[in-house]
Amino acid sequence: MTLIDALKAVASQLIVLHHLVLYGPLAIGAGLTFPDLREWLSDYGRIAVQVFLVIGGFLAARSLAPAGRGPQDNPLTLIARRYLRLAVPFVIAISLAIICSAIADHLMDDEAIPARASIKQWLAHALLLHGILGVESLSAGVWYVAIDFQLYAVIAILLWLGHSAFGAIGARSLVLGLAAASLFWFNLDSSLDNWAIYFFGSYGLGAAVFWASNGSSDKAGERRSGGNWLGIVAALTVIALLIDFRLRIGLALGVALLLGYSQHSQWPERWLNARPLAFLGRISYSVFLIHFPVLLLANGLFVFSGSASPEAACLVLLTAWASSTLAGWMFYRWVEKPSAKLRWPTTVSRPVPRVPGNIPAPRD
């Protein structure tokens, strides 16, 4: 989808820039040269993650409940597939971050460099439990990967339970009910920000957009509009913002409404159908995973070179930005894309049926 590619491209680059102006001597140099820009990116660049939350909910609803009904497969199987999809490139990126941190530690002394990793710390990241366990992060922004996995697991279970007990309406009601609870209660408690329920309001908005734009089918196969679901959640979001305004939730609502509008308009195809945006959107996860190791190396080399001018810092920072995109493309090509083909090993062994004459029948 053209708009989703464009949104992912822009959001991922904002997050990279947010970290570039936040950590290390390069950030200090950038602040001396462009103080207002650095302050804006430091304060607001992080909320670009709301774009990924809404898109994540949209895509999860499309894959798990395209007709508004819950998944027929065992949700644990679906959750295991999602874990494999996220964790394999994530673990490789974390391992690279550990190596780059060790190199940067020899080149400079800076608080941005994570402490030497322990086996326990690495395992907590590999299992996507680092946030829940309160383990120090080995790379910037890695909390989001664990949250994305939690959100997918929660929506898969809710859709399966809701459909099993109450049908399609029940499946969607459970999801959007938890989204409303998140908007009014859980998202107001920052101590819950290591748990999916804190972010589920934005995720549920994305799911509501998909169901509103694509409708649902009942058992008779009749097409029904799902626009009322988006209307209800959008109205609840506005009320939640009136009670306690949060810019991140306002952005999530704006992205959701933009996605909903684009489903009935051709303007994204006309105005956003550009190869660079599609390319950056496709490699956005890889760029997100690999940019912090690049940032550490760039800062270390800058300090090692002995240069201290703000202009040189800005030049190196721009080079690090471009290098992050290049490294993201390489990581996507050689790690993320091949790992997407991985599947959990199956141990199903069924006897070969025989036809008359004791001749084995051909396998499927």
Image: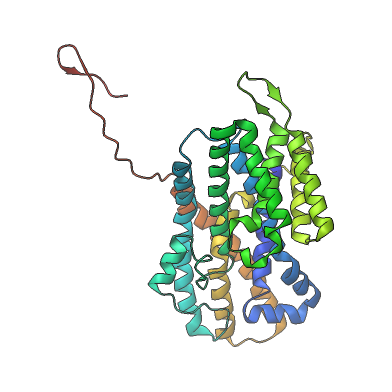
Q: In which quarter of the image is the N terminus?
A: top right
**Camera-side residue of 140 and 13:** 140
In percent of width and height, residue 282 lies at 60, 49
Image point 15% across, 12% down: which residue? 357
Image point 55% across, 80% down: which residue? 300
Q: Is residue 181 in sight in this rendering? A: yes
Image point 74% across, 43% down: which residue? 259
Of all residues, the one furthest to the top in this rendering is 356
In percent of width and height, residue 195 lies at 58, 60
Does residue 54 appear left or right of residue 196 in this picture?
Answer: right
Does residue 235 appear left or right of residue 183 in this picture?
Answer: right
Image point 58% across, 37% down: which residue? 162
Q: In which quarter of the image is residue 69?
A: top right
Q: Quadrant of residue 306?
A: bottom right
Above or below residue 224? Residue 256 is below
In percent of width and height, residue 284 lies at 60, 54
**Camera-side residue of 299 and 121:** 121
Above or below residue 293? Residue 153 is above
In percent of width and height, residue 51 lies at 69, 53
